[in-house]
Image: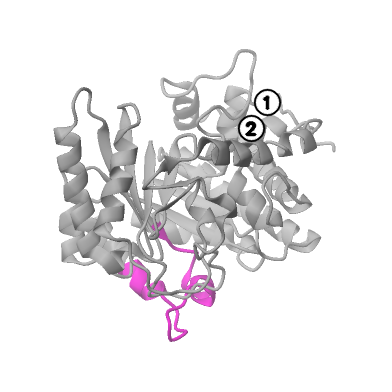
C-alpha cells in the first residue's frame, strides 16, 4: 500500500511543465493527515509506503516530521501484524538541510526522489524559481548532501522535445550523484512531432550506450524505462504491480481531504472528475470502479498492437496528460513507447551477444527469470519493419 500525502500546492520553484497548476498555499491539516493514515492502516499488513508530495513538501518540514512520528506510533500501536514502513520524499532538493537529513537518517527507511532534468543548460530552461532563475546549482547542492549522508535516492529527469536528444548527456550528468535508480519521464503534455520523436530516438540510443558501458564496467543502475522494457521481454509482458491499477494499491490525499487514485491527478484540487472519496468517508467503490472502467477502454484500442504486452498504454495519468480523458490515448504515447522498446532491445541484444557477465547475472540471475521460451535475440518486433 502506498499512501501519498499531497501536503500543499505551494512550491519554491515554477517549473514550466508542472501539471499541478497554479501555486497557492493550502496546507494539509494534522487532522486530515491522521485520518489518511488511519485509512491506510485499514489495509492488510505488508508494506506501507508513506510518500510526501506537492508542491514542494520540504516547505513544511514540521508537518513531515509530525507525520513520520505519528505513523510510527500508529504502526506500533496496531493490533496484529504490522506493516513494514518506508517513507518517500518527492522533492526538488533545493531545501535539503541538516534537519531534513537527520529526519531521513537510518534506522528509518527512506527513499528520496529528486528531480534533475539534465545538465545545467537544459535543467535551467525548465526548472526555475519564482524569480525566473535556474535551479540547477541548488538541486546539485541538495543531491550532494543526500549522497554524502548516504540517504537512498533516485533521480527523475523529465524531458520534452527540446531535452530528448540530450538524454545521454543527461544520464552522464546524473550518474556522479550515485542514485539507486534513474527515471526518464516524458512530458506528454508537450508538443511532439515526427522530428522530435526522431530526436528522442537519438537521445535514447546515446543513453543506451551509457547503460551498456555501465554494465561492461560491472555497474548495475536501473535506468527507466529501458530497465523495465528489458524485463517485459524476459517476463513476456508487464506483470502486476507494474501495470497501473488506478487506486488498487495507491491512495493520494489532497489538502482538502479528497482521495485520488494517483498524485498526478490532483492538480489544483478543483475538479472532482478523478476523486474517489474523502478521508471522512473512505474510498467510494462506485467512483473507483467508474474510473477503472473508463481507463480500461484503452485495452480495446490497443488490442491488436503487437507491442501491447510491453507498453504502458494502460497508465491512467498518461491518458489524462495526453487527451484529458481516461481510456483515450494519442499517437504520441505509441511513438514514445515504441522508441523505448527499440532502445531497450538494442541494449539487451548487444550485451547478450557479448555475453556480458554483469548483464547476464543481473537479468538472468536470482532476481528475475526469463519467461519460458524467451530469448533476448528473439524480438517481438522485427528490425526490418
Give me the residue at 70% from left, 47% from top: 339
Instruction: Kindly state the secondary structure of the residue where label 2 is placed.
Output: helix
Given residues 351 and 288, the one toward you in this image is 288
Q: Residues within 10 Å of mark 1 (few under 14, many from 20)?
A: few
Q: Position of residue 224 (x, y in %)?
A: 52, 45
- The residue sitting at the right extreme is 385
- The residue sitting at the bottom extreme is 131
> Marks 2 and 1, how far apart in space?
6 Å
Kindly check if marks 2 and 1 are in contact, taking CB atoms under 8 A apart as contact: yes
Which stretch appears magenta? 114-141
Q: Earlier in the sequence, mark 2 or mark 1?
A: 2
Q: Position of residue 190 (x, y in %)?
A: 67, 65
In screen coordinates, is 224 left or right of 379?
Answer: left
Image: 380 above or below 117 = above
In screen coordinates, is 209 left or right of 366?
Answer: right
Give the quadrant of the C terminus: top right
Image: 361 above or below 172 = above
Give the quadrant of the N terminus: top left
When asked about the image quadrant of residue 60, the answer is: bottom left
In screen coordinates, is 220 left or right of 342?
Answer: left
Residue named by callout 1: 377
When asked about the image quadrant of residue 186, the answer is: bottom right
Given residues 172 and 97, the one toward you in this image is 97
The label on residue 349 is: 2
Amino acid at each position: 500500500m502506498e499512501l501519498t500525502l499531497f501536503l500543499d500546492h505551494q512550491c519554491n520553484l515554477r517549473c514550466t511543465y508542472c501539471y499541478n497548476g497554479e501555486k497557492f498555499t493550502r496546507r494539509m491539516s494534522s487532522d486530515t493527515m491522521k485520518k489518511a493514515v488511519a485509512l491506510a492502516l485499514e489495509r492488510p499488513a505488508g508494506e506501507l509506503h508513506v510518500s510526501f508530495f506537492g508542491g514542494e513538501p520540504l516547505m513544511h518540514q514540521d508537518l513531515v516530521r509530525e507525520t513520520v512520528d505519528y505513523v510510527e506510533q500508529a504502526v506500533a500501536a496496531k493490533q496484529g501484524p504490522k506493516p513494514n514502513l518506508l517513507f518517500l520524499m518527492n522533492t526538488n532538493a533545493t531545501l535539503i538541510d541538516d534537519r531534513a537529513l537527520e529526519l531521513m537518517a537510518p534506522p528509518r527507511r527512506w527513499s528520496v526522489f529528486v528531480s534533475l532534468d539534465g545538465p545545467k543548460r537544459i535543467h535551467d530552461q525548465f526548472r526555475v524559481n519564482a524569480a525566473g532563475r535556474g535551479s540547477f546549482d541548488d538541486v546539485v547542492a541538495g543531491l550532494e548532501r543526500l549522497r554524502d549522508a548516504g540517504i537512498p535516492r533516485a533521480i527523475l529527469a523529465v524531458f520534452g522535445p527540446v531535452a530528448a536528444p540530450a538524454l545521454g548527456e543527461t544520464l552522464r550528468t546524473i550518474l556522479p550523484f550515485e542514485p539507486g535508480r534513474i527515471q526518464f519521464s516524458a512530458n506528454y503534455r508537450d508538443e511532439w512531432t515526427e522530428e522530435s520523436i526522431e530526436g528522442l530516438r537519438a537521445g535514447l540510443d546515446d543513453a543506451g550506450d551509457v547503460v551498456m558501458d555501465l554494465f561492461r564496467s560491472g555497474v548495475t543502475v536501473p535506468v527507466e524505462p529501458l530497465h523495465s522494457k528489458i524485463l517485459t521481454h524476459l517476463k513476456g509482458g508487464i506483470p502486476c504491480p507494474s501495470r497501473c491499477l488506478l487506486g488498487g494499491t495507491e491512495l493520494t490525499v489532497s489538502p482538502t481531504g479528497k482521495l485520488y487514485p494517483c498524485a498526478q491527478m490532483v492538480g489544483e484540487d478543483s475538479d472532482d472528475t478523478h476523486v474517489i472519496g474523502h478521508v471522512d468517508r473512505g474510498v467510494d467503490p462506485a467512483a473507483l470502479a467508474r474510473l477503472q472502467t473508463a481507463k480500461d477502454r484503452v485495452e480495446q484500442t490497443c488490442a491488436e498492437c503487437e507491442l501491447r504486452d510491453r507498453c504502458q498504454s494502460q497508465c491512467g495519468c498518461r491518458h489524462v496528460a495526453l487527451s484529458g480523458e481516461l481510456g483515450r490515448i494519442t499517437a504520441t504515447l505509441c511513438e514514445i513507447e515504441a522508441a523505448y522498446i527499440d532502445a531497450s532491445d538494442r541494449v539487451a541484444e548487444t550485451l547478450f551477444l557479448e555475453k556480458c557477465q554483469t548483464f547476464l547475472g543481473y537479468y538472468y540471475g536470482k532476481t528475475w527469470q526469463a519467461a519460458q521460451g524467451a530469448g533476448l535475440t528473439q524480438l517481438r518486433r522485427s528490425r526490418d519493419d
